Image (spheres, rainbow, N blue to C red):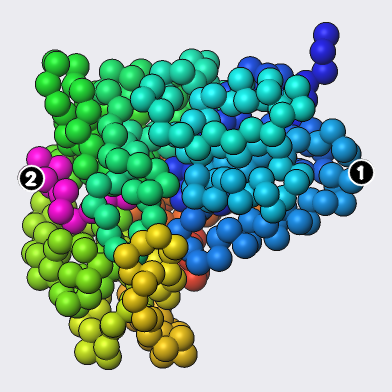
Amino acid sequence: MTEAKKLYVKTFGCQMNVYDSERMAEALGTQGYEQVDTADDADMILFNTCHIREKAAEKMYSDLGRLKPLHDAKPDLKIAVAGCVAQAEGEEILRRQPMVDLVVGPQTYHRLPAMMQAVGRGERVLDTDFPEEDKFTLLPKDRRPARGPAAFLTVQEGCDKFCSFCVVPYTRGAEVSRPADRLLGEARDLVARGVREITLLGQNVNAYHGAGLDGGEWGLARLVRELARIDGLERIRYTTSHPNDMEDDLIAAHGDCEKLMPYLHLPVQSGSDRILKAMNRKHTAESYIRLIERIRTVRPDLVLSGDFIVGFPGETEADFQATLDLVERVGYGAAYSFKYSARPGTPAAERAGVDPAQADARLQRLQTLITAQQRATQEGMIGRVVKVLFEKPGRKEGQISGKSEYLHAVHCDGPATLLGQIALVEIIATQSNSLTGRLYAQP
């Protein structure tokens, strides 16, 4: 029997890249590869890259450079680069880094088996097409065992919004939604393998409009409601959304679909209408606030998270103050904030940026406010009883850890038999990024 070859995958960036990495590992499994946890043991190393942040490509080249001693010691080691940096800079990667055998974009990794056969013949392969075929129909049907009770499921890819700071339309392509029957089949398969919670993924997930079981077009709310009918699937989440695609039926689902969790990630990026227009966001600060009010009307206990960019070209102190004002009005349980970084090829990259020191100072002020809101949200959980899906052992002996319905990390003392199960937990304390609880004994 041929000994299995060993594959090490390092994933950068978003949750969609995590999902893509799993599917690439499955595709390479048809070529005899089994995934391992360290690069030193590998016969093949795959970097699945992200292009959202500045200098992402240079960081990737640094990571590749650190592989040289290992490659020198193992000349037959295969090295592949996938993801959005691969899509944007494929030819440059092959030119600058002779160790790389294979460069594959986000839309062509279903072709990995054929690519690896070419690599085996001594060829260097570059495939960053946007093919007409649906990669998901060509990936292996047999999924690997689930690594835990929570899993990702990509339902939509690409984006048609063309925000002036974003590379996604160029690296992931136009919006494409997967047919509902295939998604339901994949979800049932995940549940059969022990998954209790599924997060639906998309670059613009609430723009989902896929072919429905009835021959019509389904939006995300209809898909969520159909997924909720699957026995054994206890929780549904989705990310990442755009304010302009929060349709009425999806808002309603937050109030009447029990399995849709009370957590929503809805990026706004700025509180200044002038900057939002420059970003090509096509919504205003006030329309965003009104939208949040509508969602909270149907789900008052909703925990909201968002994204913010500070120091966008042309941002004044008044523009930044408008962002602080919006954060104060909305109230976030969590948020991700970044200093603007120019992405080559995007319209905003040609504009003069804000002074870096000023942008740094603004980012610190914003993060201080967001941290205070996050802390207040977590402290508000003390004394409450929440439902925790336990996913893994905790850091301390006898401890187990999981996520509440509000996506808070929760740990408490408990038996390992609860892993993969949902249990009631009373929150008794809060840390910077997690909650401490104790198993709740019902009277």
Q: Give x and y (percent) for residue 343.
A: 43, 64
- Amino acid carrying label 1: it is Ala
Q: Is mark 1 on a helix, strand or loop?
A: helix
Q: Does the magenta stretch include residue 380?
A: no
Q: Is residue 176 left or right of residue 300?
A: right
Q: Give x and y (percent) for residue 299.
A: 16, 52
In this rendering, the answer to whether 134 lies above or below 95 is: above
In this rendering, the answer to whether 427 lies above or below 286 is: above
Give the extent of the magenta segment.
236-252
- Amino acid carrying label 2: it is Asp
Q: Name the residue under label 1.
A: 73
Cα distance in 3D space between marks 1 and 2: 59 Å
Q: Name the residue under label 2.
A: 248
Q: Give x and y (percent) for residue 66.
A: 78, 56
The local crowd at label 2, few if under 14, some if 14 to 19, many if 20 or more residues have their Cα within 10 Å, is few
The residue depicted at 27 percent of the width and 91 percent of the height is 317
Q: How many labels does the image show?
A: 2
Q: In this view, does 105 lie to the left or right of 271?
A: right
Task: Work out whether residue 120 can be spotted.
Answer: yes
Q: Is residue 248 magenta?
A: yes
Mark carried by residue 409: none
